[in-house]
Image: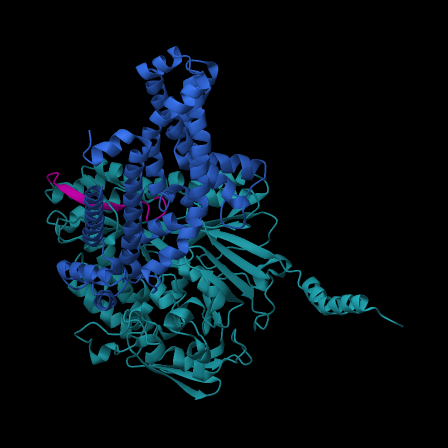
Chain colours: A blue, B cyan
Amino acid sequence: MLRYLALRLARAALTIVLVVTFAFVVLRLSGDPALIIMSPEAPEEAIQAFRHAWGLDQPIWIQYIDYFTAIAQGDLGVSFRDGRPALQLVAERIPATLILTIPALLLKICVGIPAGIHAALHRNSTTDRLVMAAAVAGFTVPSFVLGLLLVLLFAVQLGWLPSGGQESWRSMILPVITLGFGGAGVLARFTRSAMLEVLGQPYIRTALAKGVPWHRVVRGHALPNAAIPTVTVVGFMVGSLIAGAVVVESVFSWPGVGRLLVVSVSNRDLAVVQCILLLVASTMVVSNLIVDLLYGVLDPRLRAGASGGH
Amino acid sequence: MLLSRRRAAALAGAATLLPRVSLAQADNRPVITIAVQKISNSNTFDLIREQSNVGERTSSLMCERLIDLDWFHGISQMPGLATEWRRIDDQTVELSLRRGVKFHNGDEMTAEDVAWCFSAQKMFGDTTPDYMGRPGNPTSGPVIGAGSKALPPEIGPVARQRFPSLVKVEATDRYTVRFVNATPDVTLEGRIAATGSEITSRRGYEDAENWLAFARKPIGTGPYRVREFRPDNLLILDAHDEYWGGRPPIKTLRFVEVPEVPSRINGLLSGEYQFACDIPPDQIGAVESRPAFEVVGGTILNIRMTDFNKTNPTLADPRVRQAFGHAIDRQAIIDSLWAGRTRIPHGLQFDYFGDMQLTDWNVPEFDPSKSRALLKAAGYKGDAIPYRLLNNYYTNQVATSQILIEMWREVGLNIELTMKENWTQIRDLSSPRGVRDWSGGASFNDPVGGMIATFGPGGSSTAAKEWTNAEFNQLATQMQTSTDKALRKRIWRRLLEIAEREDPAYTVLHQNASFTAKRRDIAWRACPSFVMDFRASNWGAGIRG
C-alpha cells in the first residue's frame, strides 16, 4: 500500500511540474508583459526598463531556473500589476470562489445523485424522462447563457435578486444555481447509468430471488457498486473547486480566483497565472489521489489487488 | 428631577446619537454606482504608468491639472489649479496658482507641491532631457512590489516622452511656478494640460507607505477622494467637501468592475447601477427601447486607423498602400456598425487642434476604380498581404475588419487574416507583417501630441520597425521646436501629405466613440472623452453652459 501511495505521489508531483513548465513556456513565448502592461504606445526605453526590472530580458532558461529555485524556497513570485506576492493575491481570492463553488458542489450532489437514482429506479417512466431532459439541459446549456437568463428573469424582470457583484448573501444565489445546475445534470446522468448497469447484474437478481427486500437490495448492493463512477465525477468536481467558476465569475462580476485568472492571463501577469495553475493542478491531483484511495474503501476487491492479494 | 440609571444611560446614548442623525440628514446627496468594463489596467491611478483611457476616467475625479480642459466648449484650455499663465519666452511658461486649493489631506496646494510633481523624484527618475542625449542602458529602480518610495523604472521614460525637453519646474514664490524648457516649445501649455501632469500632494506622498500605496490612493485636489480600492473589483470615492470648485453633488461614487456588456446593461436595468459605461453601439437600441434609460456620449479624442508596414515587399510600393485607402467606404462602416453616431475626421486631426487643424484636408475618397488603377500601375499580382488582428481590442474591431477585407478584396487586394492575442504577436518579426489596426489620439492640442508622437522619430511605429520616412522625421523635428505658426501649419500640411497620401503610414477609418448608458432622469452630460465629470457644474440643476 505504501509503495502504491509513493508511486501515486511521485506521479502527482510530476504532473504538477509538467503543468507549471508548460504554462511557464507558453505564457512567455506568447506575449510580452511589458507591452501589455505598459501599453503598445509606451516608449522603447520604458519597455526596456520594465523588462530589465522584472528580469524578463534574461534568457528563458535562466528565468525558468530562477523560477523553480524560488518555488523551492516557497516564493511563488510577485505580481507585475499588483506588486504583492502572487500567493497572497490568490489566497485573498480563494474564499470568494469557495463560497460559490462549495454550495454549488453540495447542490450538484444533493440534487444530481438522488435524481439519478430515482430515474434509474423508475426507468422509462415519465419521471425518468423529465429528470433526464433536465439533466441534458443542465450540461448542454452553457453557463454564461444560463447565468444571463437567470439574471434577466430574477434581477431585471422580477427584481428579486442582484444581477452581480458580491454585496450580500443574496448575490450568491444566482451564481450558485448557475454553477450547480450543469453539474447536477452531469451527476444525474452518471448515477442513472451506473445504477442501471448494477441493477442488471446477476447478483441483484440473486438477492431478489433469495427474498431480500427491494429497498435493502438497492441500499446494500446497488448503491455501493454504483458509487465508483459517481465518486470519480465528484472527485473531478472537488478538484475544480478553486478555478471551476471562471465563466460564472465573469458573468456575475464575482471577484474570485476565476476572474483573477482571466485578468492575469490577458495581462500576462506571469507569477499570478503560474501560482493559480500550481494551486489548481495541486488540488486536482490531490482530489484524484483521494478518489483513488476511496475506490479501495468502496470496493474491497481493489484493496486486495493493490496489496497484491488474490 | 430624578433620573433612574437606566433612563440616564438611555438619554446619554440618545444625546450622542443626535448630532450624527442630524449630520446624516444634512447630507442627502446620492450614492451613485457606475459599472465599468475596467477600473484601471495597471491597478494604479498614476496616469504615467496607467496610460489608458479607462485610467483617465477615474483619475480625473481625484487629481487635477494646472490647466484644465473645457470638455463642453471645444475642449479648449481653461484655468484649473492655475488661474492664469503667460509666456516669459519661447522656452518658459509661468503660471499663477489658484489660492486656497485644498488637497484631500487638508493641506493647501503650493508651488512647492507643483515643482515636486515634475521632479526626478516624482516623475522623471534618472532620465535626462532629450538635448542631453538618451542613456544607453535601461533606467533603473525598484519594481512596484519592492515597497520603495523610489519610482518604478518604467515611469521616467514615459514622463520624458510627455516632456522631452523640460529642464525644470521652479517655484518663484508660494503661488507661482515656472516651467523651463531646453528648446522653444509652443506646446508646453498643452503638455501641462495633458494627462500625466496631475498635481498631487508632496506631504501625502511622503506619508504614504510606498510608491504603490500612493499610486492607489493619490492625495490630489479633485472633487472626490479615494476611500477604498479593491483592484479589478471596486473603487469607492467620497466627496471632497473642501473642493475649490464647490461642494461635490454626489456623496459617494462607486465604480464597479463588470467585464461583460450584458451584465453591465442588466445591472443598469435592474436598478443596481445608475450608469453603465463602455456600451457598444449595437446595444444602444436595446437600452433605449426602455423609456427610463438613455445612452449618451459620442466621439472622443481617438481615431481608428489601419496601419501599413512598409517593410513588407508588396507594401513597399506606396501605390499599393494608397489603394487600401481608396477602397474603403468609411461611411458604410459608420452607418452599419456605429449607428451613425461617429464621423469621418479630417485625417489624423482633431477639432481641439484649433488653428492648427487643416479643415480642408480629407481622408482618401472612396473610389474603388482608383484603387484598381493604382494596383495595376504598381504591378500588384495578388500576393497575399498579412493582416494581424486582435479580438475586439477596439470596439467593433472584428466586424470592421470583416467589412474592410471584403472592400479590399473587391478591388483585388488579397488579404490573409490571422487572429492574434496580444500586441507582442501583432509586432512579432519572425514572419512577414502587412497591415494592422491601430487607434491614434493626441495627448495635447497639437499635432506634435498625436501623429508625430506615433510616427515621428522615436515613435512607436518606428520602434516597431513598421514605417519611417526621412523627410517626415526631419520636418517632425523642426515642428517640435518651431514657434512660427505659419511655418508650423505648412509643415503640418506636408506631414499629412506624406503620412496619408504620398507614402502612407496609415489610412484613417473613423473617429472613435464612447457610449454610456444611464437613467434618463439623471441630468448629466458625457464628455467627448472617457473622462466622467461629476462636479456640481455637470450634475442635476447645477449644469451650466
Figure check: A19 above or below B527: above
Q: Quadrant of residue A70?
A: bottom left
Residue nearest the observer in this picture, A275 or A287:
A287
Tell whether B489 sits left or right of B200: left
- Pinpoint residue B432: horizontal percent, then vertical percent: 13, 48
Residue nearest the observer in this picture, A275 or B394:
A275
- Pinpoint residue B515: horizontal percent, then vertical percent: 46, 49
Q: Residue at x 31, y 61 (%)?
A: A79
In the displayed image of the protein, which residue is found farthest to the right?
B1
Res A251 seen here = no
Res A59 seen here = yes
- Pinpoint residue B149: horizontal percent, then vertical percent: 35, 76
- Residue span colored magenta: B381-396
* Image quarter in which the C terminus of chain B is found: bottom right
Examine the structure image and report whether residue B530 is included in the region drawn in magenta.
Answer: no
Q: Residue at x 34, y 49 (%)?
A: A262
Residue nearest the observer in this picture, B76 or A178:
A178
Q: Residue at x 39, y 77 (%)?
A: B117
Tell whether B204 sits left or right of A197: right
- Pinpoint residue A240: horizontal percent, then vertical percent: 34, 42
Figure check: B262 above or below A128: below
In the displayed image of the protein, which residue is found farthest to the bottom?
B173
Q: Quadrant of residue B419?
A: top left
* Image quarter in which the N terminus of chain B is found: bottom right
User: How many numbered callouts?
Assistant: 0
